Image: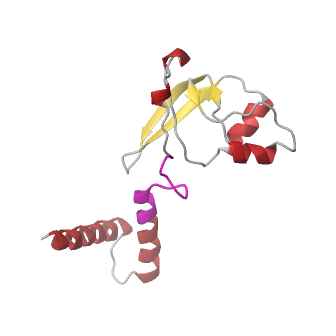
C-alpha cells in the first residue's frame, strides 16, 4: 500500500483546494523497479492498479513534488507512528548534492580555464572544499 495524496471530489472549484488541503492518496501498487543513483539515492518505480479520474488528477498534482513515501504489503500494518510529522526536507526538486553538482557544472562551463573534464573538475573542487573545511576544524 502506498500513501500519496487523495481528495474525495474533484470539480473545477476543488482543484485549487487540492493544492491547499493536500491529503494522502492511497493506491494499491506494486514495486517493480529499483535503480541506484550516483548520489546514493534510489529511483523507485511503482505500478498502480486502475485509478479513477480523480485519483489520476490528484496524482498529477504531485508530479515532481517532494513528500513522504510509505510502502508496506498490507494496509493493516500502518501505524500513526509510521507517518512522519515533519516535512520531507527536500527543496526545489533536487537533493543538496544534486544542487551543488549542478551549480559546479554551470561554473565549470562558464569559467573553465584548463582542459579538465567536468568529472575531473568536480573531484578537484570537492577536494578543495573538503580541505577548506578540514583546515577550519584544526
- The residues colored magenta run 87-101
Q: Assign the C terminus to one quadrant of the image.
A: bottom left
Q: Residue furthest right?
A: 12
* Relative to 127, residue 29 above or below: above
Which percent across, then down, holds residue 105? 44, 69
Q: Dividing the picture into quarters, in which one does residue 118 lie?
A: bottom left
Q: Residue at x 77, y 27 (%)?
A: 52
* Relative to 59, residue 119 above or below: below
Q: Dividing the picture into quarters, in which one does residue 116 lie?
A: bottom left
Q: Residue at x 55, y 47 (%)?
A: 66
Which percent across, then down, holds residue 93? 54, 55
Name the foreground residue: 45 vs 55: 55
Q: Assign the N terminus to one quadrant of the image.
A: top right
Describe residue 135's horizontal placement relative to residue 36 as left or right: left
Question: Is 106 covered by the magenta stretch?
Answer: no
Question: Is 94 covered by the magenta stretch?
Answer: yes
Describe residue 66's horizontal placement relative to residue 104 as left or right: right
Name the foreground residue: 74 vs 103: 74
Q: Residue at x 27, y 70 (%)?
A: 129
Looking at the magenta stretch, what is its main secondary structure?
loop
Amino acid at each position: 500500500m502506498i500513501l500519496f495524496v487523495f481528495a474525495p471530489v474533484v470539480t473545477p472549484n476543488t482543484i485549487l483546494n487540492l493544492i491547499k488541503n493536500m491529503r494522502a492518496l492511497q493506491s494499491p501498487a506494486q514495486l517493480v523497479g529499483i535503480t541506484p543513483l550516483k548520489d546514493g539515492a534510489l529511483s523507485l518505480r511503482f505500478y498502480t492498479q486502475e485509478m479513477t479520474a480523480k485519483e489520476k488528477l490528484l496524482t498529477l498534482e504531485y508530479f515532481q513534488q517532494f513528500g513522504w513515501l510509505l510502502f508496506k504489503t498490507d494496509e493493516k500494518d500502518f501505524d500513526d507512528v509510521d507517518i512522519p510529522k515533519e516535512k520531507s526536507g527536500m527543496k526545489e526538486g533536487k537533493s543538496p548534492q544534486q544542487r551543488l553538482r549542478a551549480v559546479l557544472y554551470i561554473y565549470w562551463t562558464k569559467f573553465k580555464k584548463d582542459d579538465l573534464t567536468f568529472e575531473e573538475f568536480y573531484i578537484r573542487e570537492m577536494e578543495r572544499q573538503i580541505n577548506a573545511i578540514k583546515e577550519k576544524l584544526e
